[in-house]
């Protein structure tokens, strides 16, 4: 997961579509871009934001549960490797580049990104040292375990449930449509020899993906 490939690029792009604006809004709300001296409480607040970003009904959650399920199938008896995969995908590929970009010009950006990465490393460890455990690492550990549990039950059949909020369901369908259109647009505009597409269809694809670029 540390190397770039078509799969990891699509993972990163989809995470950005589903979570970037929400995380930036949360960081704005606490004035994180203006922090002059990083305190432990600041890092704990950021990690709490990262935990809330993976809400059960969110696109980010759906993606990470899928990642956890694939990792669990490959490493069924090694939960710490599953946590490391989640850490690499969520923290290394999505969160830290966003934090550095969001706080560009602030000397604390690298420090915050390193602190979050350190907490994620402890959270993913098979047997973390007690002196390394922090509030933030415990929060991330709980997040990774929650995703692992969700992945374990993701394939089980569920009884039909009547949507409690049709408007919410419609919004999520639109979000997934935007993701698909974004990836289609990326494929058609970034490769040589890409197939020709009817201009009207291309306009529709561009319109659906525009707000998520």
Image: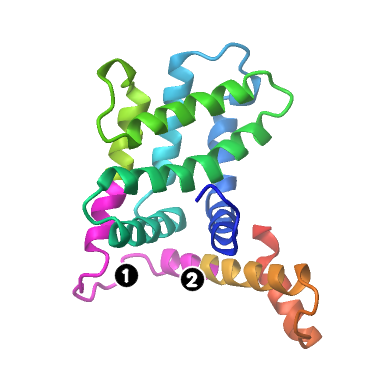
Q: Please name the residue that numbered disc 2 is placed on.
A: 173
Relative placement, left or right, of 142 versus 26 is left
Q: Position of residue 39 (x, y in %)?
A: 49, 13
Residue drawn at (53%, 58%) of the image? 11
Q: Position of residue 108 (x, y in %)?
A: 62, 19
Residue drawn at (31%, 65%) of the image? 164
Which of 49 and 142 lies nearest the eye of the viewer? Answer: 142
Q: Callout 1: 10 Å neighbours few (<14), some, many (20+)?
A: few
Q: CA distance from mark 1 to mark 2?
A: 13 Å
The first of marks 1 and 2 along the sequence is: 1
Numbered range of the magenta stretch = 146-174
Residue 163 badge: 1
Which of 41 and 85 lies nearest the eye of the viewer? Answer: 85
Q: Callout 2: 10 Å neighbours few (<14), some, many (20+)?
A: few
Q: Position of residue 105 (x, y in %)?
A: 74, 24
* Element under disc 2: helix
């Amino acid at each position: 997961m540390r190397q770039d490939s078509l799969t990891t690029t699509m993972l990163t792009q989809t995470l950005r579509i589903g979570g970037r604006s929400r995380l930036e809004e949360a960081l704005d709300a606490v004035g994180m871009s203006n922090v002059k001296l990083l305190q432990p409480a600041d890092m704990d607040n950021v990690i709490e934001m990262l935990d809330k970003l993976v809400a059960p009904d969110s696109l980010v959650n759906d993606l990470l549960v899928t990642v956890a399920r694939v990792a669990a199938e490959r490493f069924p008896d090694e939960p710490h490797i599953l946590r490391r995969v989640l850490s690499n995908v969520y923290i290394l590929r999505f969160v830290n580049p966003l934090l550095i970009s969001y706080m560009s010009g602030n000397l604390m950006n690298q420090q915050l990104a390193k602190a979050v990465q350190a907490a994620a490393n402890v959270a993913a460890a098979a047997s973390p040292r007690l002196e390394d455990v922090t509030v933030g690492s415990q929060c991330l550990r709980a997040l990774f375990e929650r995703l692992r549990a969700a992945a374990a039950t993701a394939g089980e059949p569920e009884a039909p449930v009547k949507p409690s909020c049709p408007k919410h369901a419609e919004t999520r369908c639109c979000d997934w449509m935007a993701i698909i259109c974004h990836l289609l647009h990326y494929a058609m505009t970034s490769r040589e020899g890409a197939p020709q597409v009817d201009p009207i269809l291309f306009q529709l694809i561009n319109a659906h993906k525009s707000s998520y670029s």
